[in-house]
Amino acid sequence: MQAETIELLSGKGKFSMEQALTLAEAMDGVIEKAQFVTIPILDARIATVSADWLQYYPAPPLYVGLVQFDAGARLLMEIVDVPTVGVKVGTPVRFAFRLKAHDDLRHYTRYFWKAIPVSSRGTTASHT
């Protein structure tokens, strides 16, 4: 599976081979060990952002925005660990594979990639 993932990321995703290999290894590790993973090597910034106070979220507001990758792709993502002052367009982000939702009725937990703003000092806020 890793070879197919690398081919997809480096071809259609336009990531370098090094980035594609790192991503594929991280994804395999998450699947095998069901752990959280952070990917620091992808260069991306927030292109648009919205703070939603109406949608239910355990720690409001729910931040959602387009993340622009230097490779050219844009992805609509949940933005987490946002400082109390908020987040601005152009803020660099890193990525983490985190809990998205838990379905108690079906005993099923979903995980997905989330964007985390990186401050000018290269640090992120604490996990919430």
Image (tube, grey):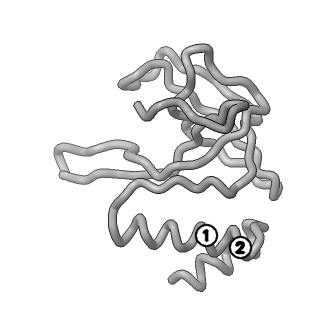
| 25, 101: nearer the viewer | 25
- Residue 36 on image: x %, y %: 41, 54
Q: What element carries label 1?
A: helix
Amino acid type at circle 1 is Thr
Which image quadrant is residue 49 in?
Answer: top right
The residue depicted at 78 percent of the width and 67 percent of the height is 14
- Residue 9 on image: x %, y %: 68, 71
Give the tally of numbered discs.
2
The residue depicted at 51 percent of the width and 83 percent of the height is 1
Amino acid type at circle 2 is Glu
- Looking at the image, residue 32 lies above or below residue 71: below
**Residue beneath disc 1:** 22
Q: In which quarter of the image is the C terminus?
A: top left
| 59, 22: nearer the viewer | 22
Which image quadrant is residue 116 in?
Answer: top right
**Residue beneath disc 2:** 18
The residue depicted at 53 percent of the width and 73 percent of the height is 25
Mark 1–mark 2 CB contact (< 8 Å): yes
Which image quadrant is residue 87 in?
Answer: top right
Q: What element carries label 2?
A: helix
